[in-house]
Image: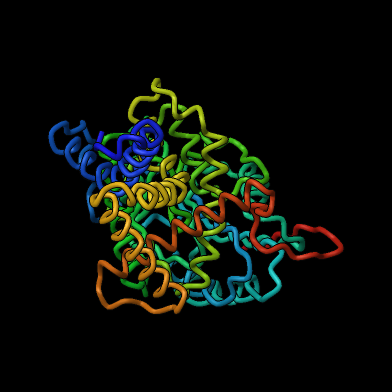
Amino acid sequence: MMRLRKYHNMDNTWIIWVTAVSTYLVIYHHLGYPLLLRVLVRYFPPKLIPSPTRSYNNTESDNQLSSMVVLMPAYNEAKWIADKIRNLSSLDYPSNKLRVILACDGCTDNTAYIASETLREVTCQHLKMTIIEYEENEGKVAVINKIMPSIGDDIVVMSDVSALISVDALLIAATYFIDPLVGVVNGRYQLLYPSKGEKKYWEYQSNLQYQEAQLGSTLGAHGALYLFRRSLFSPLEEDTINDDFVLPTKIVARGYRSSVDKAICAIELEPTNANQNFKRRLRIGAGNYQQLLRLMNLLHPQHGGIAFTFISGKALRVVMPFLMLTALLAWLWLAQYHILFAVGAALQSVTYIVVTFFVVCNITPKNSLLATLCYLVSSHTANMLGALRYIVGLEKGRWQRVCLPTYNSIEKKR
């Protein structure tokens, strides 16, 4: 321990420990964990299944491919639904092995009508699509729980309406499911119009997920696109917030693997401004706290690599804003006793003040590093506020609710 004023040594020992631990965890989560994953993948390479073929031709072997259903819960997606249907119509997968379900969850716009009209287009007429309209908005999780029992296909493809899927995504994913131990397949999430901070952040997250998958222990998925075995689905709790994390993670917890292929791409069309992104992160932050509580058993060492990635990635992410705040306050307190603490406290304070200025003024820095820091600090702030919202019961875990007097399910089949 660093020597402080004699009469303060005993009083400040615990503060020094708090400073050291909180600072270490902050650095480990953001830098140490990614570097450790890289080392593990490089020097302890896992046994991976062969890289799948990247091309597709109609052959008799089509009969051996898994049947797939693309499930799209939707709420007021009139702006994107036509492009999504055209995208699904262009996917390189046998039409007799693929169908689509669009579940309109109490939409107040003309999502269903536009979908029906788009299906009349010549290039989309071959697509086997079912449109379900629910008059009452109950939330994405409720829609998933209601529809899943009626699905008999081998593989379920979860995809957001506003995300376009790469043409050969399903064909590539099908090769992974040849291995009976693979329960989930993920792709690479990209934004069509990302800010500098968003671009760096998602590159960072994608690399983490890919390296975790190489170790056979990636957790969660992105709602833009992921696939799982229908037989492994179990109903989600009605108030589940981050369903795209909980659903695949429950499958992994049962002993199945979650694979990632960078050639499987989902591109998000819908741009978001800083305010929209912050609100989205608030909800995700509440979901992160909820999933930590409900999947606490994954922290047990018996889960091996899964426990390692869950602790290092997801669990630390929940407490990270609190650790960062603790570290800052501890460094400020100890600054009065030693120049090293004073310098550290000053660097943190200046960084947070500058970042806060850019965030509050809604200014995107030209410097890539500063833009990344702004996005990171903003995300952690939203994560902390989201967790607090969940604790006090303000987060209901649903998209915007529409109050209608009656409930009815109308199913239109082509």
- Measuring 34% from the left and 63% from the top, which residue is drawn there? 167
Q: Quadrant of residue 118?
A: bottom right
Residue lying at the far top of the rendered structure: 302
Above/below status of 206 relative to 276: above
Please state the horizontal and vertical placement of residue 276, each as a whole percent of the image: 52, 71
Please state the horizontal and vertical placement of residue 65, each as a whole percent of the image: 38, 44
Residue 266 visible within the image: yes
Q: Quadrant of residue 50?
A: top left
Q: Nearer the viewer, residue 314 or 344?
A: 344
Residue 221 visible within the image: no
Above/below status of 350 relative to 248: below
The colour mode here is rainbow
On screen, residue 250 versus residue 368, left or right, reads right
Q: How many marks?
A: 0
Please state the horizontal and vertical placement of residue 322, each as a whole percent of the image: 47, 48
Above/below status of 91 relative to 192: above
- Measuring 62% from the left and 38% from the top, which residue is drawn there? 235
Q: Nearer the viewer, residue 10 or 249?
A: 10
On screen, residue 105 versus residue 258, left or right, reads right
- Measuring 33% from the left and 29% from the top, which residue is drawn there? 305
Q: Nearer the viewer, residue 126 or 77?
A: 77
Tell me the quadrant of the picture where the C terminus can be found.
bottom right
Please state the horizontal and vertical placement of residue 389, each as a whole percent of the image: 62, 53
